[in-house]
Image (spheres, grey):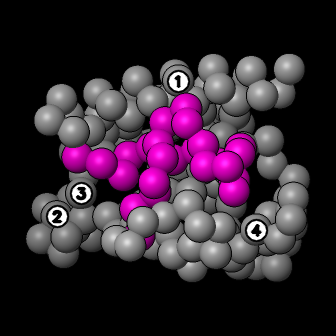
Amino acid sequence: MAKLSVPDLAPHGLPRPDTGLYSRVLEGAIPVQDVGLIDAVRRGRVEPVAALSSFEGDKVRLADGSEPAPEVVIAATGYRRGLEQLVGHLGVLDAQGRPVVHGPRTHPAAPQLHFTGYSNPISGTLRELALDARRIARAVARSSD
């Protein structure tokens, strides 16, 4: 069924998983519904790259050693937050490794760094992600004026 509903994105850097959805759920993966990513990748509006290794000043270093100059970085860290090594040194995380601010708000130590998806709101995570995405986009647009 997945092969019919989700096109092969391997030529774009997103290979199809080796195991099926049910097997991945049993391993602890959380299914994600596509809300435009597939189309954005196919049209070249989103470019998957190697894993993010570090931020160094205004540079981004990837695991393959390259240093692109992206307009935006979206770090999909999966079920585990995994933020401590990436941004822990900035003082933007609480004792449990969760961002202390989210959505359009930013921490004074990292004024252009936005977080979303690190809470479990009663209204539903996907709904909140959509709302945050709009708020973050407006905040980024205001900061670039």
The question of residue 114 being in magenta is answered with yes
Mark closest to the chain's N terminus, 4 or 2:
2
Question: Does any portion of residue 135 appear in the rendered image?
Answer: yes
**How many residues crowd mark 1 within 10 Å: few (<14), some (14–19), many (20+)?**
some
Query: Which amino acid type is shown beneath numbered disc 3?
Result: Ile
Instruction: State whether residue 122 is above or below residue 16.
Output: above
What is the quadrant of the N terminus in the image? Answer: top left
* In-image side of 21 versus 40 (left or right): left
CB contact under 8 Å: marks 2 and 3 = yes
Separation of residues labelled 2 and 3 (CA atoms): 6 Å
Query: Which amino acid type is shown beneath numbered disc 2?
Result: Val
Mark number, residue 30: 3
Separation of residues labelled 1 and 3 (CA atoms): 25 Å
Mark closest to the chain's N terminus, 2 or 3:
2
Q: Which residue is mark 2?
A: 25
Q: Which residue is mark 1?
A: 135
Magenta stretch: dominant secondary structure: loop
Mark closest to the chain's N terminus, 4 or 3:
3
Separation of residues labelled 1 and 2 (CA atoms): 31 Å
* First to last magenta residue range: 97-120
Q: Quadrant of residue 52?
A: bottom right
Q: Which residue is mark 4?
A: 55
* Element type where label 4 sits in the image: strand
**How many residues crowd mark 3 within 10 Å: few (<14), some (14–19), many (20+)?**
few
Mark closest to the chain's N terminus, 1 or 4:
4
